[in-house]
Image (spheres, rainbow, N blue to C red):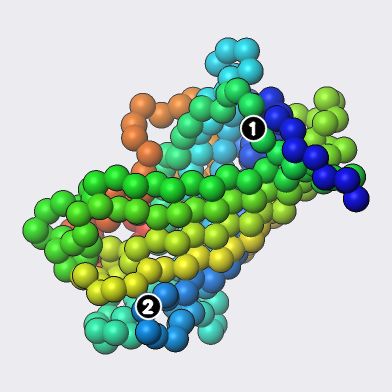
Amino acid sequence: MMVSTQLLDAKYWVKIRSSLDPARSNYLIWTGAIYSFVPGEKRQCLFKMVGMSVSRCLPTEENCWAFTSRELTYYLDPKTGEKLQTWTNPWTEETVPVMHVANNPIQGTFKGQFPAQLDDETTTLTFDIFPAYPNPLNDPKFAEYFPNPNYQAAELFKFVVPSAELFDEQQPSVSKIWLGWDRIGPWLPWMKMGDRAGHLIYSASGCKVAGFDQLPQLLQDEINTRMPLYRDAPTAPLDTEDMTSWLYFQQHFDAYLAKETFPIPAA
């Protein structure tokens, strides 16, 4: 099997991640597990997870697209797979509300070229991202939740697609994707870990699905009953910063203290 590295125009990344058709909302889903990684301790599987992204790409100029999306991820009981409302911290034995991920929006610009590996049948794109920035929860009231001065993580993505679909100029989107996502990140603020040493390790895989009715049932139920905004991607880029779990915790801290059910309903 011959493997070569090539630079691909941004339109091919658009076909993988979303679609060249701006009228379409496109769905990616993922499932996996989240582990503790504490020096000197055996790892624990803290959560299973299930998530989705609904996205749209809009052409802005030649070989350039505005990407806009919304994301949900739910933390599940590692044994039963059920959605968690509360979580008992195994280190502190305190029970806290679970703040599921509801990121609206996640946006960006796709342009230029991307390196890819091609073999006889598949094309693989790899994205290794290392976000690092000052802690947005820089306030004494958050000291028990995330006292670190900086946020730092690593996110490792791999997208594998059939080359025949990718390079078929008649197809606006690739329908078959194998997604690999691994993440190394700090304790989540809602876990109330303070300055305890350790990290979270995320290990997930996923795919693109053809429509809303192919999402995992939990996601369909949540969107139909509590989060209808997440059924479709924005029809134009939103004039706001990207949402993160840290900003979401900041915005909904009072609801967290009141032990409300997350995510907060979004009409």
Provide residue 255's location: percent of width, then percent of height.
23, 60
| Residue 171 versus residue 79 in the image, above or below | above
- The disc labelled 2 sits on which kind of residue? Val
Q: Can residue 258 be seen from the camera position used here?
A: no
Observer-nearest of 251 and 184: 184
Residue 140 numbered mark, or none: none
**Image point 18% across, 61% down: which residue?**
147
Residue sitting farthest toward the left? 140
Would you call the spot at circle 2 few (<14 residues within 10 Å), some (14-19), or many (20 or more)? some
**Image point 38% across, 39% down: which residue?**
242
Snapshot quadrant of residue 112: top right
- The disc labelled 1 sits on which kind of residue? Phe
Observer-nearest of 90 and 80: 90
**Image point 55% across, 16% down: which residue?**
60
Q: CA distance from mark 2 to mark 1?
A: 35 Å
Observer-nearest of 256 and 159: 159
Provide residue 165's location: percent of width, then percent of height.
83, 37
Quadrant placement of the C terminus:
top left
| Residue 104 versus residue 156 in the image, above or below | above
Name the secondary structure under disc 1: strand
For this view, does 13 lie left or right of residue 51? right
Name the secondary structure under disc 2: loop
In the picture of the structure, the residue carrying the numbered disc 2 is 38
Provide residue 24's location: percent of width, then percent of height.
65, 32
**Which of the marked residues, 2 or 1, is nearer the chain's N terminus?**
2
| Residue 10 versus residue 198 in the image, above or below | above
In the picture of the structure, the residue carrying the numbered disc 1 is 114
- Marks 2 & 1, CB-CB < 8 Å contact: no
